[in-house]
Amino acid sequence: MNLVSALKVQWRRLSYRAPVDTMPFVHRSYAGEGLEEWIKEGISGFQQWYQHIDFGDGLEAHVTAPPDWVPDPALNPGSGIDRWNYIILRNLPDVSGMRVLDLGCNAGLYSLELARLGAREVIGIDRDLTIRQRSGRLPRVDLIAQAQFVKSAFELREGRTFPVEYRAIDFRDINQLLNLGDFDLILAMNVVYHELDRAPRLVKALGEMTSDLIMQSSVVHPSPIREWAMPGPTVKMLMDAGFDRIAVDCPSGYEQPVIRALRS
């Protein structure tokens, strides 16, 4: 299955309507032995995997989709490190020494990749069990705990510490975002449009926090998300937020264009 076909399958399966239950999984602390078994427990315990993550030695978190959340390797292409290598990496500036915000970090993979590239500090923010995504009926998931698990697993594997911190922040609370301070770069992959009519307010706040914002839009969502996810509305929000240099990377047939916005 090629990249475009895989993305179509993934987003078609994610465009469900029935509500789903909360996924309250708490992983045990690592006790210093049995690392592979500890990673396996985390992979199976955190049922929702939006990003394909390869932990090494044959241990992988395959993308899962509702309503059963069964791991499906056919959904891996176009997600996780594949998406990073295909379209995100080429739109990044040199992040060496930068303070970076990963808005909507999900399982935290991109935050770790930013650290690998030399970012001095990365803050990843997303939902925990107390925060509900505004669009759709996604389950209540502690994505921050999931990201912390992924970070710990890689740190234990590699014997190093990543300068990455994950925090649960509700995007409706703009003051919480602004209190994070200024960033050299903000990465917002497939997240802003889920705020629907609050998306322009969120982009404006991000514009107060950075002069370099990279977002990913989408052309596959149904209404009402579609009205905020398409590249055109995204570019308008960025212009209204004061960004005056905007580049859209939209490969032929690719359905999730990346947009980099700079402010002089």
Image (spheres, rainbow, N blue to C red):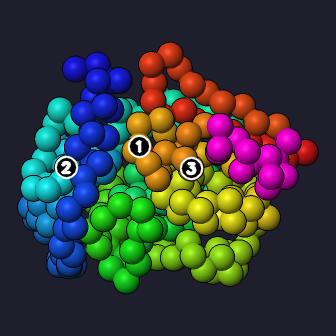
| Residue closer to the observer: 48 or 112 | 48
Q: Amino acid at mark 2?
A: Thr
Which residue was labeled with disc 3? Answer: 228
Q: Earlier in the sequence, mark 2 or mark 3?
A: 2
Q: Position of residue 122 (x, y in %)?
A: 57, 61
Q: Residues within 10 Å of mark 1 (few under 14, many from 20)?
A: some
Secondary element at image label 1: loop
User: Which tag, 1 or 3, sits closer to the chain's start?
Assistant: 1
Q: Earlier in the sequence, mark 1 or mark 2?
A: 2
Query: Marks 1/2: CA distance?
Result: 18 Å
Residue 15 visible somewhere in the drawing: yes
Whether residue 234 appears in magenta in the rendering, the answer is yes
Query: For this view, does 165 lie left or right of residue 95?
Result: left
Disc number lying in front (1 or 2): 1
Q: Amino acid at mark 1?
A: His
In the rendered view, does 123 fall on the left or right side of 30?
A: right
Residue pointed to by mark 2: 64
- What range is drawn magenta here? 232-244
Q: Are marks 1 and 3 in contact (CB under 8 Å)?
A: no
Q: Quadrant of residue 241?
A: bottom right
Q: Nearer the viewer, residue 185 or 118?
A: 185
**How far apart in space, not on screen, are marks 1 and 3 (Cα)?**
10 Å
Q: Nearer the viewer, residue 5 or 164?
A: 5
* Residue at x 68%, y 59% (from the top left corner): 200
The residue that appears at 54% across and 47% down in the rendered structure is 227
Secondary element under disc 3, as helix, strand or loop, is helix
